Amino acid sequence: MRRRRDIARFVAFRKHGEGREALVVGLGPTGRTLDGAKVRDRQNAGDLDIFVVNGFCDTELAASVTPNFYILADPLFFDFDDRTTMPNSSLHPADVWRYLREHPEVRVFIPHNCRAPLGFDDTRVVYFNGLGLEGFSRNIDATRPRGFLSMAAYNAMSVAVSMGFRRVLIVGIENSWFLSLALTSGGKVALKPHHSYDLESGDLHEIRIFREGGVPAFFEDISRLFGDLRLFRGRGIENLDAQTVVDVFPVARDRQDYLAGNSR
């Protein structure tokens, strides 16, 4: 009953994006190619809504752009222990919620089976369906169990598509972290820094879920990540990254209207 009641909040946003554009900013390196001033001008003109995820508040872009919508999907952000930090970052989940408190104009989308911290303004929270039927469903509607892997950027795309935007632009969703594959001194699967907020860090981050399966299991997951993007095909999504290896979406012809001058 509570799940239905919470997800029902989403109904008010079903037609929010009609006739307008959305920009979903992931945490991949190409997020740095955005021109904050260009994006902000389009946003202020009412032509563009901006969706961000997870540790966006720790990126350079956050200094010049305030999003319309902030999507949190990783369970990490609902662990309110101040000792918890994001991989390759000094950012705490509490820092994200602090940022959101400092920007009351930002709406927050979270899974229906999670809750914002005590004292957070619940009227700002909109719930999407947090259940997954990966491999059994092709659904991308944010109010029903998803058919894709629970990546925050994918959830953000799902939310944007479900809000009816005529075009959804993406950047920072390269799925190129396989290029950062490394092994620890003990031969365990790890990643070099690959997010827009941690590129200067030299630390390896071990991916513990691959301790048993190793490198083959890692690439099996990568394959699924690329495959799940095909569920979003034909939904008006375009990529601002001209060098992308994501082969599902066309590259936006007007990408330079959003990117810094020296970006390709």
Image (spheres, rainbow, N blue to C red):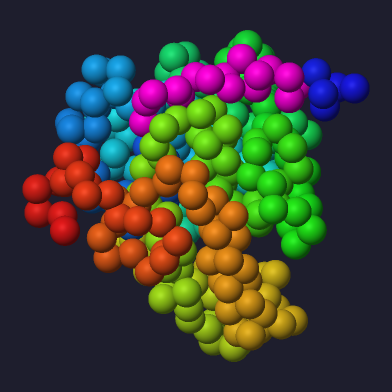
Q: Position of residue 257 (x, y in %)?
A: 17, 40
Quarter assignment of residue 230: bottom right
Q: Is residue 85 magenta?
A: no
Position of residue 189 relative to residue 117, above or below, is below
Identify the residue at horizontal 45%, vertical 61% (top origin).
248
Location of residue 160 in the rendering, given as x and y in whole percent from the top left corner: 51, 34
At 15% from the left edge and 55% from the top edge, which residue is drawn?
263
Q: Where the C terminus falls, by quadrant?
A: bottom left
Q: Is residue 56 visible?
A: no
Residue 255 against residue 8 in the figure, above or below: below
Q: Residue furthest left?
A: 261
On the question of residue 18 being in view, the answer is yes
Q: Examine the image and state in which quarter residue 3 appears.
A: top right
**Which residue sits at x=24%, y=32%?**
39
From the viewer's perspective, is 87 left or right of 130? Answer: left
Front residue of 26/45: it is 45
Q: Quadrant of the N terminus?
A: top right
As drawn, is 241 to the left or to the right of 167?
A: left
Question: What is the residue that sits farthest to the right in this orientation?
Answer: 1
**Quadrant of the rendered image containing residue 57:** top left
Q: Is residue 15 magenta?
A: yes
Residue occupying the point 36% across, 43% down:
169
Total of numbered circles in the picture?
0
Q: Tell me: residue 127, above or below residue 191.
A: above
Could you tell whether 239 is left or right of 132 in the image?
left
* Magenta residues, start to end: 6-22
**Image position of 167 (left or right of 92):** left
Depth check, front residue: 29 or 228: 228
Residue 187: x percent and y percent? 59, 88
- The residue lying toward the viewer, choosing from 64 and 127, is 127
